[in-house]
Amino acid sequence: MVEAIIFDAGGVLLKGSIKRFLDRCREELGLSPIKNIEQDGGAVFGFEMQTGVKSPAETFSELFGNPEKELLKKVLKLNEAEWPQDPEMVEFAKSLKPRYKIGLLSNTDELHSTLWRKNGFTNLFDAVVLSNEVHLVKPDKRIYLLMLEKIGLKAGQCVFVDDIKDCIEAAKKLGFKTVRFSGKSQLENELKGLGVEF
């Protein structure tokens, strides 16, 4: 029986994309990355940033070839603005709370985790595991096990929702029920198929 739904943030509860962020840096600031990064659905962009080893400022400075300080501030602002909440999805997650625990398990960085704690986004959840705070990133199985410990349930009692294939596969191997997210109606249909009531 399902007792919890655990959500990823970016691409599920938040709108945004690394590709769009990079496009905006190119178009609005005239900056292009000096090294290739995976943009087609990979789980980890800026591994050291998402594990809390490097700050977003350090990561983007390296990525864009050490731009001047004012330009780097603009890059950080664009990155912060690139991931707004999807109101419809956030409301859907809230609607599950009377019957289920809800969790947030996300690869993120210091900039966004600080923002989410400040604006109350993380308060919506019964358990929160953010990669930069625990120094682990999905699809590392240890981050999923940490979520199970925090939410107080077994993998088979949880549905994990993410838009990244590698992250879904890692959760499946641990026994989670999973939904690879592509939209709200698709998610609702798949959750119903797993016996989730709303």
Image (cartoon, rainbow, N blue to C red):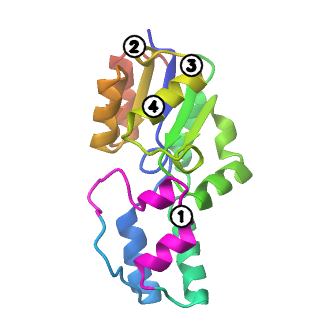
Look at the picture and state if 56 lies above or below 83: below
Which of marks 1 and 3 precedes in the sequence? Answer: 1
Residue type at mark 2: give it. Answer: Gly
Query: What's the CA distance linking mark 2 and mark 1?
Result: 41 Å
Instruction: State yes or no: residue 45 in magenta.
Output: yes
Residue type at mark 3: give it. Answer: Tyr
How far from the left and from the top, in percent, is residue 108? Answer: 51, 53
How far from the left and from the top, in percent, is residue 58? Answer: 53, 73
Viewer-nearest of discs 4 and 1 = 1
For label 1, the crowd category at 10 Å Cα-Cα, with few meaning under 14, some 14 to 19 and many 20 or more, is: some
Look at the picture and state if 91 lies above or below 196: below
The residue depicted at 46 percent of the width and 51 percent of the height is: 10
Viewer-nearest of discs 3 and 1 = 1
Look at the picture and state if 115 lies above or below 97: below
Query: What's the CA distance linking mark 3 and mark 1?
Result: 35 Å
Local secondary structure at mark 2: loop
Q: Which residue is mark 4?
A: 144
Q: Which residue is mark 3?
A: 100
Query: What's the CA distance linking mark 3 and mark 2?
Result: 12 Å
Query: What's the CA distance linking mark 4 and mark 1?
Result: 22 Å
**Disc number for residue 195:** 2
Residue 98 shows in this picture: yes
Local secondary structure at mark 1: loop
The residue depicted at 26 percent of the width and 58 percent of the height is: 40
| Quadrant housing residue 38 | bottom left
Magenta stretch bounds: 38-65
Look at the picture and state if 12 lies above or below 79: above
